Structures are given as structure tokens and as C-alpha cells.
Image (cartoon, rainbow, N blue to C red):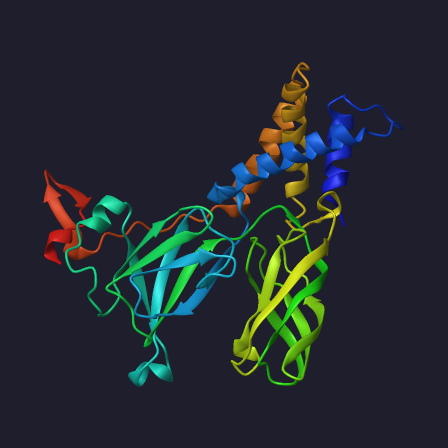
């Protein structure tokens, strides 16, 4: 598999900064890696550069809003935007054959603020996303109860997989049920890693051994983690585990489709020329644009424009979508 280090070295050669057969300086590698991460962070914002969407799911909990981020109510990497959302009713006749109902997006906090009955519990109709950092905030209105399951559609992550390898027990906790538990999810106390799990041994109510089962992604050394007791009998507390080893970021594996490699390579070359104050190579610029255009065509998904009848206002023959918060 191609690693971040491979991309950095090849781009340094292509840009003419590193000669064939030369060994790059650690400073050059690290600077190039920083540039690469900045570039991918910009790409993450653009829907046409992200190859996949996925769903983040949880049931309603009578809360006006819930956080989304690693270890939060909606457990996922923090999205910059929610692409779409829908809900599923979990009670009544729909249990055997559940039906999905779309949630309409409120695009600004100003519009959300116009809703009068913000504590109304009823059939969910709208969602608003506040993309705060480090955790976003998802507002569903009317407020969903436990009879509704909320599905949020967000962009998948792009970049390189930094995996969890090992850690040390800082506090064994107490009150856990003795036994051996497999594939128990980690929960962040600090840090922003996601999707890691562990095999756990409990003796005399204390957690005495933890082995990484699924390495997850995004963890850093000294992150503090605990475990989701939902899968351990919902008893016990106080356990803390500190991350001591992760995959070297430069040796992290590329986790994107192969057609992205050329786009990353030539786009990184163009940025390196700017950083090292070298003349921009027109061929590299052209190849970067062509590769990005290939990705754009491959990822294009154009939603059908729909205006619900109740929100159609006819003015001089044109349709306008107007969120009428005064009606609620």
C-alpha cells in the first residue's frame, strides 16, 4: 500500500527539490507532509472530491440538540456539513416494514431561532447543523423521542489511516462484571480518534487487560480512552486507558480509490513549487487539473431539485422556497 511518506518523497522528486537517488531531509519530509494534510483538509470540504457518503445513526433522546464527533451522541468524525437526513419510526405497524421520512434542512441558525415552540415533541420535520469545533451540534425539530431513529448522511473521510496500536491502563476502574469481552468500543475521554475497539479481561471487578481489536483511525499518543459499558453489562466505571503507540503518521496507509493518487501527486507538486519559491511547471498544473476533473466526473451526484408544495410561493411565475417559522 502507498503511504504518506511515499507521496511526499515522489512529489519532492517531481518538483525538482530532491534529486534521484538522494535521501530527503527530515525537515523536507515533515514540511511536505504538513502541506499534504492541509491540501486534503481543503479537499474534504468539497463534495465532488469525496468518494463516498455514509450514515451516522442514533435514536431520539428527547433532546433539542446532540453533539456529533468522536465519542459523542452521534459517534463519527466531525462533519463540516450534513448532506441530508431522514428519520425512521420504530413503533407501530412500521416496525415490521419501517418507512423512512426525509428531514428538511434549515440552512441558518437565524431561521432556526425563528421557531417559537423549540421544545415541541412531535413528528420530526426539520434539522439544522451547527458546525462548531471540535464537535458539531445537530438540532432536530420537533424534538424526537425514542420512537424515532435519526439518520444523518455525511461525507466519508479522505486521507491516510493512522491506526491505534497499544496503550497502558491508567486506572482499572471498579464494579465491572468479571469475564472476557471481545470487540468492545473505545470511548474518548480526550482526543478525536474513532472506531477503535478492544478485547477486555475483567477480574474481581477491575479491568486487568486490554488488547486492541480494531485499530480505528485518528488516535494520537497520550489520548485518554475508556470503554463502552453497554456491551459489558452496563456496570462498572472509572477505567482509563492511555494511548502509547499509533502508526507513524508518515507511514499511514492511503485509504482512497487509486484514481486519487495522480491528483494528489501533481496537486502536491504545484504546492511544493510555491512553498520552495520555484517556477511552476505548466505540465504539472495541467496534469493536476485533468486528474481532479476525472475525480469530479466520477463522483458527480446531482440531487433532483424538489420544492415541497406547502413551501411554494408564486411570484411573477417563479417558485421560491421560504421557511415559514412563524407557522410554528
> Please, is residue 53 above or below residue 211 in the view?
above
Report the front residue among 147 and 62: 62
Q: Is residue 10 visible?
A: no
Report the front residue among 205 and 263: 205
Placement of the C terminus among the 4 image quadrants: bottom left
Q: Residue furthest right?
A: 21
Give the residue drawn at x 41%, y 57%. 67
Image position of 189 (left or right of 83): right
Image position of 287 (left or right of 304): right
Q: Position of residue 281 (x, y in %)?
A: 67, 18
Q: Position of residue 193 (x, y in %)?
A: 59, 55
Q: Position of residue 184 (x, y in %)?
A: 61, 73
Give the residue drawn at x 62%, y 55%. 223
Image position of 243 (left or right of 150): right
Give the residue drawn at x 21%, y 63%. 119
Give the residue drawn at x 66%, y 70%. 198
> Please, is residue 181 above or below residue 139 in the view?
below
> Please, is residue 105 above or below residue 231 in the view?
above
Q: Is residue 92 visible?
A: yes
Amino acid at each position: 500500500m502507498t503511504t504518506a511518506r511515499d507521496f511526499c518523497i515522489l512529489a519532492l522528486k517531481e518538483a525538482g527539490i530532491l534529486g534521484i537517488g538522494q535521501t530527503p531531509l527530515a525537515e523536507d519530509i515533515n514540511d511536505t507532509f504538513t502541506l499534504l494534510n492541509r491540501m486534503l483538509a481543503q479537499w474534504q470540504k468539497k463534495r465532488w472530491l469525496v468518494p463516498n457518503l455514509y450514515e451516522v445513526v442514533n435514536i431520539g433522546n428527547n433532546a433539542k440538540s446532540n453533539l456529533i464527533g468522536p465519542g459523542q451522541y452521534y459517534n463519527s468524525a466531525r462533519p463540516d456539513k450534513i448532506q441530508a437526513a431522514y428519520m425512521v419510526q420504530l413503533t407501530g405497524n412500521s416496525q415490521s416494514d419501517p418507512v423512512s421520512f426525509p428531514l428538511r434542512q434549515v440552512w441558518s441558525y437565524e431561521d432556526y431561532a425563528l421557531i417559537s415552540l423549540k421544545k415541541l415533541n412531535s413528528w420530526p420535520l426539520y434539522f439544522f447543523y451547527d458546525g462548531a469545533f471540535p464537535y458539531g451540534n445537530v438540532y432536530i425539530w420537533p424534538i424526537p423521542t425514542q420512537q424515532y431513529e435519526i439518520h444523518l448522511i455525511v461525507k466519508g473521510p479522505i486521507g491516510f489511516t493512522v491506526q491505534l496500536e497499544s496503550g497502558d491502563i491508567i486506572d482499572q476502574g471498579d464494579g465491572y462484571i468479571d469475564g472476557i469481552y471481545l470487540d468492545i468500543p473505545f470511548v474518548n475521554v480526550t482526543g478525536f480518534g474513532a472506531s477503535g475497539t478492544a478485547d477486555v479481561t475483567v477480574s474481581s471487578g477491575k479491568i486487568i487487560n486490554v488488547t486492541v481489536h480494531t485499530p480505528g483511525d485518528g488516535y494520537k499518543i497520550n489520548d485518554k480512552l475508556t470503554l463502552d459499558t453497554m456491551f459489558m453489562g452496563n456496570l462498572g466505571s472509572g477505567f482509563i486507558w492511555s494511548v502509547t503507540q499509533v502508526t507513524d503518521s508518515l507511514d499511514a496507509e492511503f485509504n482512497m480509490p487509486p484514481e486519487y493518487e495522480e491528483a494528489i501527486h501533481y496537486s502536491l507538486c504545484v504546492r511544493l513549487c510555491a512553498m520552495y519559491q520555484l517556477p511552476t511547471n505548466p505540465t504539472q498544473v495541467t496534469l493536476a487539473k485533468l486528474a481532479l476533473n476525472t475525480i469530479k466526473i466520477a463522483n458527480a451526484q446531482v440531487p433532483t431539485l424538489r420544492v415541497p408544495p406547502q413551501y411554494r410561493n408564486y411570484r411573477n411565475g417563479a417558485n421560491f422556497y421560504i421557511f415559514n417559522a412563524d407557522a410554528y
